[in-house]
Amino acid sequence: MVSGRVQGVFFRDTCRQNAVAQGVTGWVRNLPGGDVEAVFEGPEDRVTRMVDWAHQGPPAAAVTEVEVRDEEPERLSGFEVLPTPRA
């Protein structure tokens, strides 16, 4: 989960572009409380690059915190921007 000023700053689309460029699969979405949630799958070095990117985000973002959890891969294909879940 990524916290700070991360909505309304093209975080999701920039994340998608970077993930595709890195060959990382997964998804990203806004959360109702103002945070962003993302899942990255792929080679460890590429996932690490995406997590490092999430600490900065796009130029207009002001990331204050990134929470990282390791999970079992879901074998996702492609990288999607998902809709915001209902609160």
Image: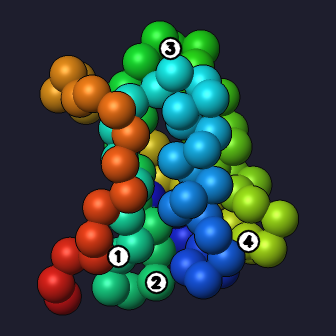
In front of the other: 73 or 81: 81
- Structural distance between the alpha carbons of marks 3 and 4: 25 Å
Task: Please name the residue shown 27% across and 27% down the image.
Answer: 77
Please tell me how crowded label 3 is: few (under 14), some (14-19), or many (20+) other residues with Cα within 10 Å: few
Mark number, residue 44: 3
- Structural distance between the alpha carbons of marks 3 and 2: 28 Å
Q: What x and y, as percent, mark residue 45?
A: 59, 14
The answer to whether mark 2 and mark 1 are in CB contact below 8 A is yes
Amino acid on which the number 3 mark rests in the picture: Glu
Question: In the picture shown, does residue 46 fall above or below 65?
Answer: above
Mark number, residue 34: 2
Residue under label 1: 31
The answer to whether mark 3 and mark 2 are in CB contact below 8 A is no
What secondary structure is found at the residue carrying circle 3? helix
- Structural distance between the alpha carbons of marks 2 and 1: 6 Å
Question: In the picture shown, does residue 22 fall above or below 3?
Answer: above
| Sequence-first tag of 1 and 4 | 1
Amino acid on which the number 4 mark rests in the picture: Ala
What secondary structure is found at the residue carrying circle 2? loop
Amino acid on which the number 1 mark rests in the picture: Leu
| Sequence-first tag of 1 and 3 | 1
Judge left or right: residue 62 versus residue 80.
right
